[in-house]
Image: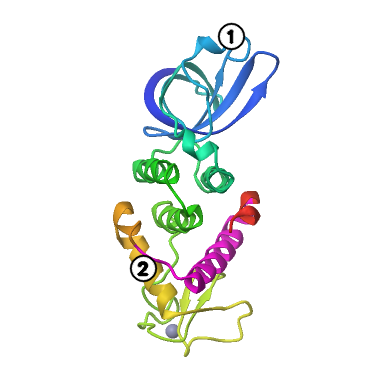
Amino acid sequence: MAIISTEAVVLRTVPLRETSVIAFFFTRSHGKVNGVLKGIRKDPRKFRTSLDKLSVNDIIFYQYRNSDIHLISHCDMKEHFPAIRVDIKRMTAADYACELLNKIMPVEQKNEPVYTLLLDYCRSLGEARDPGRLVHMFQIKLLALSGFRPHIDSCVQCACAVTHKAKFSTRQGGLVCPRCERREPGLIPVSPGALASLIYIEKHPWLQCLKLTLAPSVRKELKNILNNFLLYHLEKNIKAAKYLE
Ligand SMILES: [Zn+2]
């Protein structure tokens, strides 16, 4: 058994018996970690945290070898983002990110770039007038950092440059040029504007992407491409997706 100290973002919680809570964290040092906070419901002062969704905490946990639910001995809140919880659109965007991370990321595998992305997302969401735009940025960057990157630099079949009349194949996970386009059902046309936005968001730092303007038509396209791609490859629906704009 190892004792581990790390920083962690709360993804969700479920009550355990009368007195305790199981918390699902995304941690800086071990990726997704689940743990029990014993007695927190009976005596909330036992831990210096509210365990609110997307709050950032310093935690210490006892990592058991034969269980994927560990014992959390300390959980001290560092950042809380109250502005997320007073706005239904921001909360929906928070729910979506937590659910997507939970479904896409493996248990207990360190991925610090994803942790940093999550922190950037939390901090921006607290100030966001347009949370839907942040969701697209989060989706695109998370796909690239988690090994699910769609092939958008060239045709996924013949590797030629695709500059116009590109279509996106969810099955093949990338762009298909007009020559390779066969009778594959469900190909999604991609406008040059949507393609440029996808590539820009994937390649640039979070703060720089915040300055990018996305036209309503481009957002509609991105939503369609990304949601279909995620559904096909995860084989699971993200429940919160239907509540996003
Ligand atoms: Zn091709």
- 85 relative to 21, above or below: below
**Mark 1 / mark 2, whichever is N-terminal:** 1
**Range drawn in magenta:** 212-238
Q: Is residue 232 magenta?
A: yes
Q: Which mark is residue 43?
A: 1
* Location of residue 160 in the rendering, given as x and y in whole percent from the top left corner: 36, 83
Q: In this rendering, would 216 be left or right of 240?
A: left
Q: Main secondary structure of the magenta part?
A: helix
Quadrant in which residue 44 is drawn: top right
Q: In which quadrant of the rendered image does the N terminus lie?
A: top left
Structural distance between the alpha carbons of marks 1 and 2 = 49 Å
Task: Determine if residue 166 is in view.
Answer: yes
Residue type for callout 1: Asp
- Residue displayed at 38% across by 46% down: 117
* Location of residue 74 in the rendering, given as x and y in whole percent from the top left corner: 45, 15
Q: Is residue 223 magenta?
A: yes
Q: Nearer the viewer, residue 121 or 102?
A: 121
Query: What residue is disc 2 on?
Result: 199
Q: Which mark is residue 88?
A: none
* Location of residue 129 in the rendering, given as x and y in whole percent from the top left corner: 46, 52
